[in-house]
Amino acid sequence: IIADTPGHVQYTRNMVTGASTADLALVLVDARKGIVEQSRRHAFLATLLQVPHLVLCVNKMDLVGYSQEVYQQIHDEFTAFAAKLRVPDLTTIPVSALAGDNVATRSENMPWYDGPSLLHHLENVHVASDRNLIDVRFPVQYVIRPQSDDWHDYRGYAGTVAGGSIRKGDDVMVLPSGFTTKVKAVETADGEVPEAFPPMSVTLRLEDDIDVSRGDMICRPHNQPRVAQDVDAMICWMDESAGLRVGGKYAIKHTTRTARTIVKDLSYRLDVNTLHRDEDASSLRLNDIGRVRLRTTMPLLCDDYSRNRATGGFILIDEATNKTVAAGMITDAA
Protein backbone atom coordinates (compact mmCIF):
# COMPACT_ATOMS: atom_id res chain seq x y z
CA ILE A 1 0.00 0.00 0.00
CA ILE A 2 1.66 3.23 -1.11
CA ALA A 3 0.49 6.69 -0.14
CA ASP A 4 2.00 10.08 -0.82
CA THR A 5 -0.54 11.97 -2.95
CA PRO A 6 -3.96 13.50 -2.21
CA GLY A 7 -6.49 10.68 -1.86
CA HIS A 8 -9.87 10.31 -3.48
CA VAL A 9 -12.86 8.01 -3.21
CA GLN A 10 -11.59 5.05 -5.20
CA TYR A 11 -8.10 5.22 -3.69
CA THR A 12 -9.37 5.17 -0.12
CA ARG A 13 -11.75 2.31 -0.92
CA ASN A 14 -8.96 0.33 -2.56
CA MET A 15 -6.63 0.93 0.35
CA VAL A 16 -9.13 -0.25 2.94
CA THR A 17 -9.89 -3.34 0.84
CA GLY A 18 -6.21 -4.13 0.29
CA ALA A 19 -5.08 -3.42 3.83
CA SER A 20 -7.68 -5.79 5.28
CA THR A 21 -5.65 -8.76 3.98
CA ALA A 22 -2.15 -7.21 3.84
CA ASP A 23 0.80 -8.31 5.95
CA LEU A 24 2.79 -5.14 5.38
CA ALA A 25 2.01 -1.53 4.46
CA LEU A 26 4.29 1.01 2.77
CA VAL A 27 3.70 4.70 3.41
CA LEU A 28 5.58 6.68 0.78
CA VAL A 29 6.49 10.25 1.76
CA ASP A 30 8.01 13.01 -0.40
CA ALA A 31 11.18 14.17 1.36
CA ARG A 32 10.53 17.74 0.18
CA LYS A 33 7.02 17.91 1.68
CA GLY A 34 7.41 15.76 4.78
CA ILE A 35 4.47 14.22 6.64
CA VAL A 36 1.15 15.43 5.22
CA GLU A 37 -2.48 14.68 6.11
CA GLN A 38 -2.65 11.72 3.72
CA SER A 39 0.43 10.18 5.34
CA ARG A 40 -1.26 10.25 8.74
CA ARG A 41 -4.57 9.02 7.31
CA HIS A 42 -3.03 6.03 5.56
CA ALA A 43 -0.83 5.14 8.53
CA PHE A 44 -3.87 5.27 10.78
CA LEU A 45 -5.94 3.14 8.39
CA ALA A 46 -3.15 0.56 8.24
CA THR A 47 -3.02 0.28 12.03
CA LEU A 48 -6.81 0.35 12.33
CA LEU A 49 -6.92 -2.60 9.93
CA GLN A 50 -4.29 -4.39 12.05
CA VAL A 51 -1.56 -4.52 9.39
CA PRO A 52 1.27 -5.88 11.56
CA HIS A 53 4.24 -4.35 9.69
CA LEU A 54 4.54 -0.70 8.66
CA VAL A 55 7.33 0.76 6.51
CA LEU A 56 7.86 4.50 6.08
CA CYS A 57 9.69 5.18 2.81
CA VAL A 58 11.11 8.69 2.64
CA ASN A 59 11.35 9.09 -1.14
CA LYS A 60 13.10 11.63 -3.41
CA MET A 61 16.12 11.90 -1.15
CA ASP A 62 18.13 12.93 -4.22
CA LEU A 63 16.12 16.17 -4.41
CA VAL A 64 17.13 17.18 -0.88
CA GLY A 65 20.80 16.37 -1.36
CA TYR A 66 20.56 13.06 0.53
CA SER A 67 20.30 15.13 3.71
CA GLN A 68 20.41 13.17 6.94
CA GLU A 69 18.83 16.11 8.76
CA VAL A 70 15.75 16.11 6.48
CA TYR A 71 15.35 12.36 6.85
CA GLN A 72 15.77 12.50 10.63
CA GLN A 73 13.16 15.24 10.96
CA ILE A 74 10.58 13.22 9.00
CA HIS A 75 11.53 10.07 10.91
CA ASP A 76 11.06 11.76 14.29
CA GLU A 77 7.74 13.36 13.32
CA PHE A 78 6.28 10.11 12.00
CA THR A 79 7.60 8.08 14.94
CA ALA A 80 5.92 10.50 17.36
CA PHE A 81 2.61 10.11 15.50
CA ALA A 82 2.97 6.32 15.31
CA ALA A 83 3.50 6.20 19.09
CA LYS A 84 -0.17 7.17 19.45
CA LEU A 85 -1.20 4.21 17.30
CA ARG A 86 -0.81 0.46 17.71
CA VAL A 87 2.16 -0.23 15.44
CA PRO A 88 3.75 -3.61 16.29
CA ASP A 89 6.64 -3.17 13.82
CA LEU A 90 7.77 0.15 12.30
CA THR A 91 10.70 0.55 9.89
CA THR A 92 11.84 3.75 8.15
CA ILE A 93 13.96 3.70 4.99
CA PRO A 94 15.31 6.70 2.99
CA VAL A 95 15.08 5.99 -0.75
CA SER A 96 15.28 7.55 -4.17
CA ALA A 97 13.02 5.60 -6.51
CA LEU A 98 14.35 7.47 -9.55
CA ALA A 99 18.03 6.80 -8.81
CA GLY A 100 17.46 3.41 -7.15
CA ASP A 101 19.07 4.43 -3.86
CA ASN A 102 18.27 1.93 -1.08
CA VAL A 103 15.63 0.26 -3.25
CA ALA A 104 17.29 -3.01 -4.26
CA THR A 105 20.74 -2.42 -2.75
CA ARG A 106 22.29 -0.12 -0.16
CA SER A 107 23.14 3.34 -1.46
CA GLU A 108 26.61 4.88 -1.38
CA ASN A 109 25.00 8.33 -1.38
CA MET A 110 23.68 7.83 2.17
CA PRO A 111 26.55 6.36 4.20
CA TRP A 112 24.89 7.60 7.37
CA TYR A 113 22.04 5.08 6.91
CA ASP A 114 22.92 1.63 8.26
CA GLY A 115 19.61 -0.16 7.77
CA PRO A 116 18.48 -2.60 5.05
CA SER A 117 17.40 -1.73 1.52
CA LEU A 118 13.68 -1.78 0.82
CA LEU A 119 13.79 -5.00 -1.21
CA HIS A 120 15.89 -6.77 1.42
CA HIS A 121 13.43 -5.78 4.13
CA LEU A 122 10.41 -6.94 2.11
CA GLU A 123 12.03 -10.29 1.35
CA ASN A 124 13.04 -10.96 4.95
CA VAL A 125 10.22 -9.58 7.09
CA HIS A 126 8.69 -12.40 9.15
CA VAL A 127 4.95 -12.70 8.57
CA ALA A 128 4.18 -16.38 9.28
CA SER A 129 3.62 -15.80 13.00
CA ASP A 130 1.15 -12.96 12.35
CA ARG A 131 -1.70 -15.35 11.52
CA ASN A 132 -3.95 -16.75 14.24
CA LEU A 133 -3.07 -20.44 14.44
CA ILE A 134 -4.83 -20.99 17.76
CA ASP A 135 -8.55 -20.39 17.19
CA VAL A 136 -10.00 -22.78 14.58
CA ARG A 137 -12.39 -20.87 12.34
CA PHE A 138 -13.81 -22.36 9.12
CA PRO A 139 -16.73 -20.41 7.58
CA VAL A 140 -18.62 -22.73 5.23
CA GLN A 141 -18.86 -21.21 1.78
CA TYR A 142 -20.38 -24.04 -0.23
CA VAL A 143 -21.86 -27.49 0.38
CA ILE A 144 -20.63 -30.03 -2.20
CA ARG A 145 -23.17 -32.74 -3.03
CA PRO A 146 -22.31 -34.44 -6.37
CA GLN A 147 -25.42 -35.72 -8.13
CA SER A 148 -23.93 -38.97 -9.43
CA ASP A 149 -24.01 -42.64 -8.50
CA ASP A 150 -20.22 -42.74 -8.08
CA TRP A 151 -20.35 -40.11 -5.32
CA HIS A 152 -23.83 -40.81 -4.00
CA ASP A 153 -22.94 -40.40 -0.30
CA TYR A 154 -20.33 -37.66 -0.70
CA ARG A 155 -20.90 -34.49 1.29
CA GLY A 156 -18.15 -31.90 1.63
CA TYR A 157 -18.02 -28.41 3.06
CA ALA A 158 -15.84 -26.00 1.10
CA GLY A 159 -14.32 -22.76 2.34
CA THR A 160 -11.18 -20.91 3.36
CA VAL A 161 -9.54 -21.56 6.72
CA ALA A 162 -9.81 -18.31 8.68
CA GLY A 163 -7.89 -19.44 11.76
CA GLY A 164 -6.17 -22.32 13.51
CA SER A 165 -5.21 -25.65 11.97
CA ILE A 166 -7.55 -28.51 11.09
CA ARG A 167 -6.53 -32.19 10.91
CA LYS A 168 -8.26 -35.47 10.25
CA GLY A 169 -9.78 -36.82 13.47
CA ASP A 170 -10.14 -33.44 15.18
CA ASP A 171 -13.22 -32.82 17.31
CA VAL A 172 -15.24 -29.93 15.85
CA MET A 173 -18.48 -28.09 16.46
CA VAL A 174 -20.81 -26.54 13.88
CA LEU A 175 -22.36 -23.17 14.74
CA PRO A 176 -25.01 -21.94 15.18
CA SER A 177 -26.58 -25.41 15.58
CA GLY A 178 -24.05 -26.57 18.19
CA PHE A 179 -23.76 -30.12 16.77
CA THR A 180 -20.41 -31.83 17.37
CA THR A 181 -18.58 -34.39 15.26
CA LYS A 182 -15.10 -35.29 13.99
CA VAL A 183 -13.23 -34.37 10.82
CA LYS A 184 -13.27 -37.34 8.46
CA ALA A 185 -10.98 -35.86 5.80
CA VAL A 186 -9.34 -32.62 4.69
CA GLU A 187 -9.28 -32.35 0.89
CA THR A 188 -7.99 -29.99 -1.78
CA ALA A 189 -8.15 -30.07 -5.58
CA ASP A 190 -5.00 -32.23 -5.50
CA GLY A 191 -6.41 -34.76 -3.08
CA GLU A 192 -6.44 -35.33 0.67
CA VAL A 193 -3.98 -33.41 2.86
CA PRO A 194 -2.98 -34.07 6.48
CA GLU A 195 -3.58 -30.52 7.70
CA ALA A 196 -5.18 -27.22 6.69
CA PHE A 197 -4.24 -23.76 7.97
CA PRO A 198 -4.82 -20.12 6.94
CA PRO A 199 -5.28 -19.11 4.19
CA MET A 200 -5.79 -22.53 2.56
CA SER A 201 -8.99 -23.24 0.62
CA VAL A 202 -10.12 -26.78 1.39
CA THR A 203 -13.09 -29.10 1.60
CA LEU A 204 -13.89 -30.74 4.95
CA ARG A 205 -15.72 -34.03 5.27
CA LEU A 206 -17.30 -34.85 8.62
CA GLU A 207 -17.89 -38.21 10.31
CA ASP A 208 -21.61 -37.58 10.90
CA ASP A 209 -24.36 -36.38 8.57
CA ILE A 210 -25.40 -33.22 10.36
CA ASP A 211 -27.13 -30.12 9.04
CA VAL A 212 -24.48 -27.70 7.74
CA SER A 213 -25.13 -24.89 5.26
CA ARG A 214 -23.48 -21.81 3.80
CA GLY A 215 -22.77 -19.21 6.49
CA ASP A 216 -22.24 -21.77 9.27
CA MET A 217 -18.94 -21.89 11.15
CA ILE A 218 -16.86 -24.97 12.00
CA CYS A 219 -14.75 -24.50 15.15
CA ARG A 220 -13.49 -26.33 18.24
CA PRO A 221 -16.10 -27.36 20.86
CA HIS A 222 -14.24 -25.48 23.61
CA ASN A 223 -12.99 -22.56 21.51
CA GLN A 224 -15.94 -20.88 19.88
CA PRO A 225 -16.43 -17.46 18.28
CA ARG A 226 -18.98 -15.10 19.73
CA VAL A 227 -22.56 -15.51 18.55
CA ALA A 228 -23.90 -11.98 18.57
CA GLN A 229 -26.55 -9.73 17.07
CA ASP A 230 -25.34 -6.53 18.74
CA VAL A 231 -21.82 -5.50 17.75
CA ASP A 232 -19.65 -2.44 18.33
CA ALA A 233 -17.38 -1.66 15.41
CA MET A 234 -15.07 0.91 13.88
CA ILE A 235 -16.11 1.70 10.32
CA CYS A 236 -14.65 3.64 7.42
CA TRP A 237 -17.39 5.28 5.35
CA MET A 238 -16.81 5.06 1.59
CA ASP A 239 -19.99 6.36 -0.04
CA GLU A 240 -19.71 9.80 -1.63
CA SER A 241 -23.42 10.11 -2.44
CA ALA A 242 -24.87 9.66 1.06
CA GLY A 243 -23.65 9.52 4.63
CA LEU A 244 -24.19 7.08 7.45
CA ARG A 245 -26.99 8.02 9.80
CA VAL A 246 -28.34 6.54 13.00
CA GLY A 247 -31.31 4.37 12.11
CA GLY A 248 -29.97 3.60 8.65
CA LYS A 249 -30.56 0.08 7.35
CA TYR A 250 -28.01 -1.84 5.29
CA ALA A 251 -27.03 -5.35 4.25
CA ILE A 252 -24.03 -6.71 6.13
CA LYS A 253 -21.57 -9.26 4.67
CA HIS A 254 -19.55 -11.06 7.33
CA THR A 255 -17.38 -14.07 6.35
CA THR A 256 -19.80 -16.18 4.27
CA ARG A 257 -22.93 -14.95 6.03
CA THR A 258 -25.18 -12.16 4.78
CA ALA A 259 -27.82 -10.43 6.89
CA ARG A 260 -29.50 -7.06 7.34
CA THR A 261 -28.50 -4.55 9.97
CA ILE A 262 -29.56 -1.25 11.47
CA VAL A 263 -27.28 1.43 12.90
CA LYS A 264 -28.41 1.79 16.51
CA ASP A 265 -25.87 4.38 17.65
CA LEU A 266 -22.91 6.50 16.50
CA SER A 267 -20.55 6.80 19.47
CA TYR A 268 -18.08 9.21 17.91
CA ARG A 269 -16.34 10.34 14.74
CA LEU A 270 -12.54 10.18 14.79
CA ASP A 271 -10.20 12.91 13.52
CA VAL A 272 -7.33 10.95 11.96
CA ASN A 273 -4.92 13.89 12.27
CA THR A 274 -5.36 14.63 15.97
CA LEU A 275 -7.04 11.32 16.96
CA HIS A 276 -9.68 13.48 18.68
CA ARG A 277 -13.09 11.86 19.24
CA ASP A 278 -16.05 13.99 18.19
CA GLU A 279 -18.81 12.57 20.36
CA ASP A 280 -21.35 15.13 19.08
CA ALA A 281 -21.19 13.80 15.51
CA SER A 282 -24.56 12.76 14.11
CA SER A 283 -23.38 11.19 10.83
CA LEU A 284 -20.37 9.96 8.90
CA ARG A 285 -19.46 11.33 5.48
CA LEU A 286 -17.03 10.20 2.80
CA ASN A 287 -13.70 8.96 4.27
CA ASP A 288 -14.90 9.51 7.85
CA ILE A 289 -14.01 6.93 10.49
CA GLY A 290 -16.19 6.35 13.52
CA ARG A 291 -17.43 3.89 16.10
CA VAL A 292 -20.97 2.55 15.76
CA ARG A 293 -23.26 -0.04 17.29
CA LEU A 294 -25.12 -2.34 14.93
CA ARG A 295 -28.05 -4.69 15.41
CA THR A 296 -28.27 -7.55 12.90
CA THR A 297 -31.27 -9.63 11.85
CA MET A 298 -29.40 -12.89 12.45
CA PRO A 299 -26.48 -13.71 14.76
CA LEU A 300 -22.94 -13.16 13.50
CA LEU A 301 -20.29 -15.77 14.31
CA CYS A 302 -17.46 -13.36 15.04
CA ASP A 303 -14.29 -12.52 16.93
CA ASP A 304 -12.77 -9.16 17.77
CA TYR A 305 -10.90 -7.84 14.74
CA SER A 306 -7.72 -7.54 16.80
CA ARG A 307 -7.80 -11.32 17.32
CA ASN A 308 -8.87 -12.48 13.86
CA ARG A 309 -9.16 -10.17 10.88
CA ALA A 310 -11.16 -12.68 8.84
CA THR A 311 -13.93 -13.20 11.41
CA GLY A 312 -13.74 -9.67 12.80
CA GLY A 313 -14.19 -7.74 9.54
CA PHE A 314 -17.32 -6.99 7.53
CA ILE A 315 -18.73 -4.68 4.87
CA LEU A 316 -21.98 -2.72 4.71
CA ILE A 317 -23.93 -2.70 1.45
CA ASP A 318 -26.60 -0.26 0.25
CA GLU A 319 -29.46 -2.58 -0.68
CA ALA A 320 -30.90 -0.10 -3.19
CA THR A 321 -27.71 0.23 -5.27
CA ASN A 322 -25.82 -2.92 -4.17
CA LYS A 323 -22.82 -0.65 -3.55
CA THR A 324 -20.34 -1.24 -0.74
CA VAL A 325 -20.66 1.85 1.47
CA ALA A 326 -18.46 0.96 4.47
CA ALA A 327 -15.84 -1.41 5.78
CA GLY A 328 -15.99 -2.34 9.45
CA MET A 329 -13.88 -3.91 12.19
CA ILE A 330 -15.64 -5.50 15.16
CA THR A 331 -14.33 -4.26 18.51
CA ASP A 332 -16.90 -5.85 20.81
CA ALA A 333 -19.89 -8.18 20.47
CA ALA A 334 -22.73 -9.12 22.77
Image: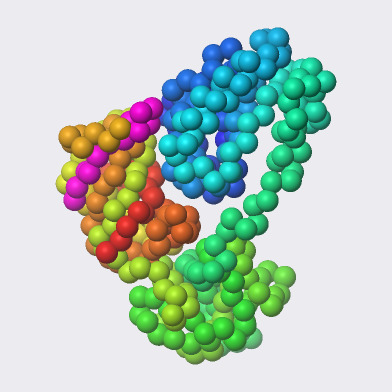
**Picture coordinates of residue 136 (x, y %)?**
51, 71
Say left or right for 67 vs 290: right
**Picture coordinates of residue 142 (x, y %)?**
49, 69
Dividing the picture into quarters, in which one does residue 113 lie?
A: top right
Q: Which segment did they paint magenta?
A: 264-275
Q: Residue at x 27, y 36 (%)?
A: 277
Q: Residue at x 18, y 43 (%)?
A: 246
* Residue 275 visible, this orientation: yes
Q: Residue at x 51, y 42 (%)?
A: 87
**Picture coordinates of residue 183 (x, y %)?**
56, 83
* Residue 42 visible, this orientation: no
**Picture coordinates of residue 298 (x, y %)?**
28, 65
Taking 205 as reference, is 18 above or below it? Answer: above
Q: How is the image coloured?
A: rainbow
Query: Is residue 317 a member of the stretch shown in magenta?
Result: no
Name the residue nearer the viewer: 53 or 303: 53
Name the residue nearer the viewer: 191 or 286: 286
Taking 215 as reference, is 105 above or below it? Answer: above
Dividing the picture into quarters, in which one does residue 291 lie?
A: top left
Say left or right for 131 vs 36: right
Taking 51 as reference, is 12 above or below it? Answer: above
Q: Residue at x 27, y 64 (%)?
A: 334
Say left or right for 29 vs 68: left
Name the residue nearer the viewer: 24 or 88: 88
**Quadrant of the frame with the N terminus:** top right
